[in-house]
Image: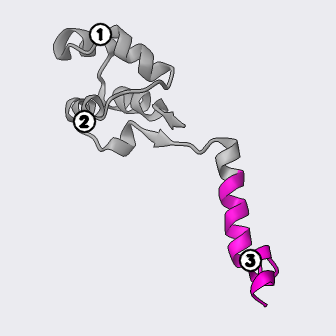
């Protein structure tokens, strides 16, 4: 999941308000609503926000794995490291 919580923190640190974004940078309320709800935002828009806020992409966007993604990756890693996994048993 992509989260935009860092965007709001960066805005506050830079002293830029939502009003500033509407009035001076033509950022729409619907875009801010999508960011607030962690919905899809085009990379071009994220690039524009980085330029406005003079920040890096990591200051706006964060990837947080879904709980099932975490489990899937953990299981695959354990299988690779387990000398008794099914693949390795069959090769003996």
Residue 19, which numbered label? 1
Indicate which disc, 2 or 1, sits on the residue closer to the N terminus.
1
Residue placed most toward the observer, 24 or 62 = 62
The CA span between labels 2 and 1 is: 20 Å
State the residue lying farthest toward the bottom. Answer: 92
In the displayed structure image, the side of residue 49 where residue 62 appears, left or right: right
Q: Can residue 35 be seen in this view?
A: yes
Residue 35 lies, with reference to residue 64, above or below; the image says: above
Residue receiving disc 3: 87
Indicate which disc, 2 or 3, sits on the residue closer to the N terminus.
2
| Quarter of the figure with residue 58 | top left
Helix or strand or loop: what does disc 1 sit on?
Answer: helix
Q: Nearer the viewer, mark 2 or mark 3?
A: 3
Q: Nearer the viewer, mark 1 or mark 3?
A: 3
The CA span between labels 2 and 3 is: 44 Å
Indicate which disc, 1 or 3, sits on the residue closer to the N terminus.
1
Residue 35: x and y in percent read 43, 23
Residue 52, which numbered label? none
């Amino acid at each position: 999941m992509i989260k935009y919580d860092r965007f709001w923190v960066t805005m506050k640190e830079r002293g830029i308000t939502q009003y500033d974004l509407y009035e001076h940078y033509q950022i729409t309320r619907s875009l801010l609503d999508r960011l607030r709800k962690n919905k899809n935002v085009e990379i071009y828009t994220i690039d524009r926000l980085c330029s406005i806020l003079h920040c890096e992409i990591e200051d706006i966007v964060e990837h947080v794995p879904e709980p099932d993604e975490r489990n899937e990756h953990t299981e695959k890693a354990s299988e690779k490291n387990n000398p008794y996994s099914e693949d390795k048993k069959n090769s003996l």
